[in-house]
Image (tube, rainbow, N blue to C red):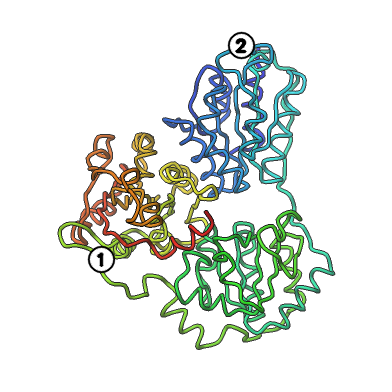
Amino acid sequence: MITVAEQIGAYLARLGVGHAFGVVGSGNFVVTNALRQAGVPFTASRHEGGAATMADAYSRMSERVSVLSLHQGCGLTNAGTGISEAAKSRTPMIVLAAETAEHQIYSNFAMDQRNFARSVMAEPERVYSPESALSDTLRAYRTALRDRRTVVLNLPLNVQSAEAVGEIPDVRVEPRPDIAPSAVDVRKLSDAISASRRPVFVAGRGGRGAKHEILALARATGALVATSAVAKGLFNDDDFNLGISGGFSSPLTAELISEADLIVAFGCALNMWTMRHGKLIGNNTVVAQIDVEDSALGAHRPVDVPVLGSSTGVASALLEVFAGEERAGYRTADVRHRIEKHARWDQTPTEDLGMPGQTIDPRELSREINRRLPAERIVSIDSGNFMGYPSQYFDVPDEFGFCFTQAFQSIGLGLYTAIGAGLAQPERMPVLGTGDGGFLMAVQELETAVRLRLPLVVVVYNDAAYSAEVHHFGQDHDMATVTFPDTDIAAIARGFGAEGITVRSIEDLEALGEWAASAPSTPLVIDAKVADDGGSWWLAEAFQGH
């Protein structure tokens, strides 16, 4: 007899899910093995929270639907933060959540899983019966893939164990096609571009698939290009690339964006992070926003030209309007020279804050690590005061070289992110920038990285504090709740089977170069004792939203 659980695992494999992550208990044991036997790779994490963000990162960096497999009740609640992060970011992911049967209301594992999923902004679904199992599974997969949603597919135990009904169909689900904009919207936006002399195009995650079209349009219309944090690397090859727009921006990038007379957002939310609470938008700047959902247009701030459509569809339509043109616009020789010399934070002179033999300046640390690591890398970021340093100082090869799971602003997701991203891009060296607080919150997954033999570099910006709070509230408050004794993180890493080094100076990084050149198959954790920066440059902007 083939059970419903076995049927669901085999069907998801046939539909094309990319990788499964989870913690296996009695409720999800059979369905997880069915996925594995059907050829879907499975990574066992040490905590469901880790598995959730690994799955999220895998989908972001591979553009395939991932699977998160969970035990009923507590397995789902343990994964709640990671599921919410994925849902907020519109990650196509299926959560296979075992569920107690409806009649088992007194089970220790019983809970309202459907409304729990809703509460963390995921899409709740259920396999209702053996007869509906295939259609229920297909519906969940279509929602994840075509609508880019995180779907919690609840699997009642009594249905899982029942005999399967019907044969698995040979069905192929295609991603949703590009949404073509209306002729009216194209005309309004083309008129705005024609009237502009200093246009800037800002692409978010929704613009990643339209790189070539957006760049061609920018070159035709004289626009500078920038990205939100999640799309870093998208325009690396363009001379007029400003890098990340928002709180992480260099002084020159912020200046040039704020002086734009037109900002066009391609698949970008224009939220408080990307526009510095609106400070990057001039008083007379025209703002256009392109998105595939009506509800996203103007959600964070008023827009003058809302355009419903995909980034590819809109950019392609505009290219027809501006065919053969090559306006100078904002793309002048002077602006190109300024971008070349000053657009990057590591080109901005800063005072060395390090204390010899004790601490290292986080900017000097980041510059040197960037220089010593191979170019083919995939960088992941945790949250905290430190996060601007690896985000801006670590180069990435393209838009699939940077994974930023920070829609929920939760510390502790970085190590999970790095593992999932590394599995999605196995030809690249995974690199993590994290704080001591976030790393210690997730440290159990270092064992997972060791077990997977990942050549992972973990850079811990260790100042023995939750320093975002230290710098936000200032020394006039009692800091005992957010400061800690110094922790020997390198020793902890070695205890998990990784390599660990303590860094207080540039010279201490010699071991990094040796490790990188050794074809490593063991993670390296860098316990960097960083100097107090008084609050990183982006922190004041960030806390205005709290």
Quarter of the figure that contains the N terminus: top right
Tell me which corner region of the image, top left, top right, bottom left or bottom right, holds residue 390: bottom left
Look at mark 2 in the image and give the residue it sits on.
106
Q: Quadrant of residue 545?
A: bottom right
x, y percent for residue 267? 65, 60
Side of 410 where 114 appears, left or right: right
Q: Quadrant of residue 141?
A: top right
Secondary structure beneath disc 2? loop
Q: Which of 465 and 527 is in front in this view?
A: 465
How many neighbours does mark 2 have within 10 angstroms: few (below 14), some (14-19), or many (20 or more)? few
Which residue corresponds to the image point at 36% horizontal and 57% vertical from the top-left? Answer: 474
Estimate the x, y position of residue 535 in percent, counting from the top left: 37, 61
The residue at the point 48 percent across, 57 percent down is 543
Q: Nearer the viewer, residue 1 or 454?
A: 454
Q: What residue type is labelled 1?
A: Leu
| Residue in the image at 25% along x and 38% along y | 492
Residue 353 is labelled as 1
